[in-house]
Image (cartoon, coloured by chain):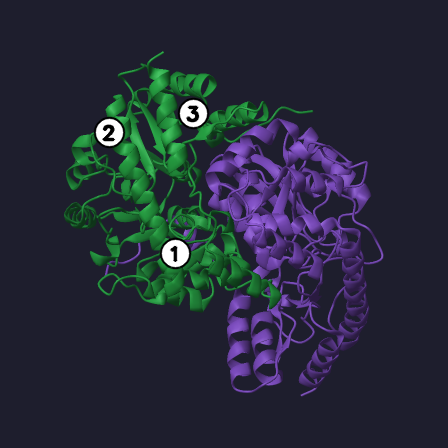
Chain colours: A purple, B green
């Protein structure tokens, strides 16, 4: 057997460290141990029944052939109409994609020439950086902390802009920090990126999952932004792999051509199912779930702070808390591994999210029931007092 | 509104000309005209009922969450076992992907550094070339004709190899020509590419759809090839967007990491449905369909030849005939447009498949009922006698 001759880009792609945590957790469980999962990055709720029923009905009706590369016209229309009137794009600008991953791939394929730089926050979702590299770009990570709610600001963007910078990627709410870019700052960023001649991309996949606040789409500030969104998180459709991209009008044709070549079309049954995602009854169920996530955050945040974890900014979205654990360790990865092995609580170490002080941080997910969170906190408390 | 600032790669991506044909066909149909569709690139059969039922059962059982990035272990196992004993890979080497597009994307991401060349046949499936470009590679099209069954040969590969060549992509059966690489030539190619220090990638998505012959997987010749396959064509699952990749052992970990970052996971309901694809009863149904495709080819091939189309090699797979139309025109695209407008028959012009004599060729698809094919031939005959 011959040795692998890998492209250079592959060397830069680390496996997610949480995969090791997950594998260890499964191993412990197979030995009969009960593990509290606070490392998981997907909602614990199943897809709402009405959406599932729509998927089943589509299959029964024989909707198993390709759709247009940009998606079913009715779904593009429904997505467009889901935006508030100040932000609403024409359906023509909405491209249905295989997950937010597909939307980001199209975006970077459309925007990035070799060596083109994209600014993004560190800590941040690791796949976004990898996708930039995959399409020949350079991901320029800008360290962020509590002072800016773990988000980029217009000022930082101006400061880190180089002649090779072509785009900025925001994620609001952010994974791993759960924090939002304020509407005021978002307006400044839109203005700044435009002035600098770049393109703003906003990952809004956790929209809908915000607590005590509603996140406004960046589309409310400009039609010139790229918006990445997904049916995975708020709509509970992770396994269906369906997302969307809203592109500025001048990019529609190019992105359509790219979609035809990159993935031909998004899943047909998933698209038919997603038509029910905007149904008023489904909306009620999704808002009920949102209230449950809010309740979990309201329990977990003060509980972790009381234990000595540093969470200086109140996270208002997604289902994550990004916590400074330097009161207990200088190596968050070893801390996470020990917490799992000794006390059966699984977390994601900071290293999965960047190079800016990852050893001081862990990510808690509250995509698990309140009872589990309580048991997790009890175990962590006991673990820390050993 | 600002002008689009597109990456250079986008300029190189032409829209599929068949999309224009399709749009014109739909327009004619909306005026009440009946169009014979011989331009379509997907089977006219729906997904076999047992597979659909398995998808429905999966949804009813709540299988709506992510799976592993590389796919359900049971599905990887079932795919591995679907290969004959001489070709069978370990399940570990099978990566489930969002369609063959996803499999090719992973392959090129793993193999191509900027400027790396991939040899492929012209005419050939256009998305393959575009995906090479998308990942920074250079698609080197090698003109092929009837003398080599419209396929690359070991000799051509040796002749066109350059210091920058890293891989060869075969498609057997081929879209648009329906021809296969013979098993003897395949063995030579495997040997030659290995000797040259490159990697062989074989697109086997039309395996199963061969007539009077069984296509042997390139895995029978070497464990060092990349195999791209799909549930779309033989298994009739186009809209589900599910394919797979078999990688050489040394590439498994890298491709797993890429999959985690590029698309997270393939569709969960589709994977559960595909578990039924290898069921003996489904196999019977698929073989029945295969016989129907054979019957259509056996009608259409002599009928077109009798009309004066040049089809020098008997196509033994897929559902396409690539026909020389230079007896009737010097511009196959204009010919296709006129045939549609005047006589209501839709074909795909050669230009969608490359730059090697496209103006002399059109592609006929027989993914439509025999009665439609007969009517199409009748109309074409009348059209040519005007």
Front residue of A23/B164: it is A23
Return the residue nearer the eye: A186 or A72.
A72
Task: Give the left or right position of residue B228, taking residue B163 as reference.
Answer: right
Residue beneath disc 1 = B285
* Total tally of numbered discs in the picture: 3
Which residue lies at the image location 69% right of the left edge and 80% below the top edge? Answer: A380
SS type, badge 2: loop
Between the residue at mark 3 and the residue at mark 2, the CA separation in whole angstroms equals 19 Å
The local crowd at label 1, few if under 14, some if 14 to 19, many if 20 or more residues have their Cα within 10 Å, is: some
Residues marked 2 and 1 touching at CB (< 8 Å) = no
Residue receiving disc 3: B345
Quadrant in which the C terminus of chain A is drawn: bottom right
Front of the two marks 3 and 2: 3
Q: Residue at x 56, y 74 (%)?
A: A334
Label 3: element kind: strand
| Structural distance between the alpha carbons of marks 3 and 1 | 30 Å
Judge whether B178 appears above or below A43 on screen. Answer: above
Would residue B84 appear left or right of A211 to someone viewing this image?
left
Mark 2 or 1: in front is: 1
Q: Earlier in the sequence, mark 3 or mark 2?
A: 2
* Secondary element type, mark 1: helix
At horizontal 72% and vertical 34% (from top left) the residue drawn is A89
Q: What residue is shown with label 2?
A: B311
Q: Choose the circle earlier in sequence order: 3 or 1.
A: 1
Q: Quadrant of residue B93?
A: bottom left
The residue marked by circle 2 belongs to what chain?
Answer: B
Picture coordinates of residue A9 (x, y %)?
Answer: 42, 49
Name the subunit of mark 3: B
């Amino acid at each position: 057997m011959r040795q692998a001759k890998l492209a250079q880009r592959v060397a830069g792609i680390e496996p997610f460290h949480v995969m090791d945590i997950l594998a260890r957790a499964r191993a412990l469980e197979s030995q009969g141990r009960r593990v509290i999962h606070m490392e998981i990055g997907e909602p614990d709720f199943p897809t709402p029944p009405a959406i599932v029923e729509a998927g089943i009905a589509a299959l029964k009706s024989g909707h198993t052939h390709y759709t247009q590369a940009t998606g079913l016209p009715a779904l593009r229309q429904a997505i467009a109409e889901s935006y508030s009137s100040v932000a609403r794009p024409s359906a023509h600008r909405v491209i249905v994609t295989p997950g937010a991953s597909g939307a980001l791939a199209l975006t970077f394929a459309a925007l990035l020439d070799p060596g083109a730089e994209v600014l993004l926050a560190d800590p941040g979702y690791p796949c976004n950086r990898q996708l930039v590299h995959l399409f020949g770009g350079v991901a320029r990570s800008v360290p962020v902390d509590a002072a800016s709610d773990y988000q980029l600001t217009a000022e930082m963007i101006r400061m880190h802009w180089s002649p090779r910078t072509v785009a900025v990627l925001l994620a609001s709410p952010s994974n791993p920090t759960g924090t939002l870019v304020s509407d005021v700052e978002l307006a400044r960023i839109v203005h700044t990126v435009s002035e600098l001649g770049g393109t703003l991309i906003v990952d809004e996949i956790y929209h809908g999952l915000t607590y005590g606040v509603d996140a406004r789409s960046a589309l409310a500030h400009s039609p010139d932004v790229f918006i990445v969104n997904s049916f995975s998180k708020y709509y509970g459709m992770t396994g269906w792999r369906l997302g969307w991209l809203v592109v500025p009008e001048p990019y529609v044709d190019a992105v359509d051509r790219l979609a035809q070549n990159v993935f031909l079309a998004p899943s047909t049954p998933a698209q038919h199912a997603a038509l029910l995602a905007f149904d008023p009854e489904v909306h009620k169920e999704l808002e009920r779930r949102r209230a449950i996530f809010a309740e979990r955050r309201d329990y977990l945040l003060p509980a972790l702070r009381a234990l000595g974890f540093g969470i200086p900014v109140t996270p208002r979205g997604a289902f994550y808390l990004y916590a400074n654990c330097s009161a207990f360790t200088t190596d968050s990865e070893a801390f996470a591994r020990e917490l799992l092995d000794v006390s059966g609580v699984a977390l994601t170490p900071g290293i999965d999210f960047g190079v800016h002080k990852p050893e001081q941080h862990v990510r808690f997910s509250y995509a698990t029931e309140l009872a589990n969170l309580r048991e997790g906190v009890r175990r962590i408390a006991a673990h820390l007092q050993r």
